[in-house]
Amino acid sequence: MKRRTLAAIALATALVGLVAGCSSGTSAATGKKVTVDAGGTSVSVQGPIRLAYFAPSVNNAWLQSSTSTVKAEVAKIKDAKVTVFDAKWDGTTQFNQVQNALQSNRFNAMIIDPINDEIMCKIMSQTAPKKGVVVSVIAVPLCGRALKVGEEQYTPGTLNYIGGTDSSTVFEGYIEHMAKENPGPQKVIALSGPKLFGVTKNLEKAIETMKKKYPDFDIVSTVDTDYTLNQGQAKLAPLLKANPDTTVVFSAANSDVTQGAYQALKGAGLDGKVKLYDKGASKWAIEQLRDGTLAGSSPYYPSTMAAQSVKAIAAAFAGEKVTSYLPNDGAELTGEAAKTGVQILTPADAKSFDPEY
């Protein structure tokens, strides 16, 4: 009894927000009972949907877009409810939030954007389905699968994986694009996400692979950030002082970090002299790309990814078969990217691109 009470208190304190769909006092025991195939694991569920969304944080535009879309999509589903958890970039906090949520028996579906995919592996792919909880994974693959490619990023035991826009192959394609666009010796600084995050692992793998193919495109430093504008500026500024002959900055984290990097370049008097490439294609980034301030971008689709995740859960509860892997954040690849799998935007492309955040 004491353990259950403590778990309930921890769950309450972790709560960020509760958004209801159509108002209903119906219990979770009502509705059609269905068996969901989670990669060979059968999960028995019954509506209405009681969803827990575990966000790594809500401190940037990308995450705010994803969170607001989850809430909006759940609101369209009859009697469905969602609770959002903010882990504030702490992997242990996120694990405890999931553990307490499972112990509470309040939820029958979860969306996870994992901070530490290894510690979240077993609890999301084994414990959750045993508790009758369907899990949709977004952005970062579970169980060390971030370094894998394509359908291998999906983890059995979960409903699906939606993401892939920061896989190693995408970064390899982007580095190749930059190297070809900037022939000859180049001194490059790269900005990434948090150390344990899949984006950082994939970037490091891509850099190691591509330096053999393009040795002149020399990425001399890679620094991690917490995905915020402030760290983009604060972490790049001293590197520019230490490397005054930098020719290219690759902001591989997101557009908030790119915006901070731009401020650092301005502060050093290097804006317009050092080429700045973005990963994210936010509204700010697309405006700068159109103006020529940025040399290029590669999109993230946080809203599409979140919407596809909620829709997949709703389809599963309706007894429908769900695709286990959706690449490119669930968005359609256009133009040459349909062949290469890497969507890269030039200033010309930016004129017709509609950013999601």
Image (cartoon, rainbow, N blue to C red):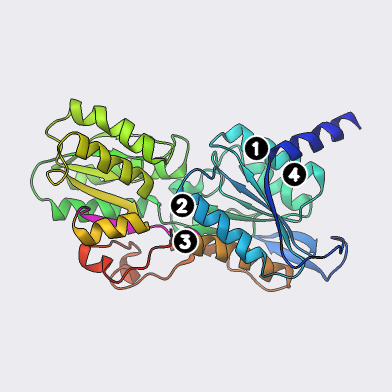
Quadrant occupied by the N terminus: top right
Q: Which residue is mark 2?
A: 62
> Which x, y percent locates residue 244?
14, 31
Specify start and end residues of the magenta stretch as a single range. 293-302
- Inspect this view and state whether residue 254 appears: no
Front disc: 3 or 2: 2
Most foreground residue, 253 or 67: 67
Number of other residues with Cα within 10 Å of mark 3, as a class: few under 14, some 14 to 19, many 20 or more: many
> Which x, y percent locates residue 245?
11, 33
Q: CA distance from mark 1 to mark 2?
A: 22 Å
Q: Secondary structure at mark 1?
A: helix
Q: Which residue is mark 3?
A: 329
Front disc: 1 or 2: 2
Residue 62 part of the magenta-drawn span: no
Q: Are marks 4 and 1 in contact (CB under 8 Å)?
A: no
Front disc: 4 or 2: 2
Identity, as a three-letter code, of the amino acid under mark 3: Asp
> Which x, y percent locates residue 107?
76, 52
Identity, as a three-letter code, of the amino acid under mark 1: Phe
**Mark before the other along the chain sequence, 1 or 3:** 1
Q: CA distance from mark 3 to mark 2?
A: 13 Å
Q: Secondary structure at mark 4?
A: helix
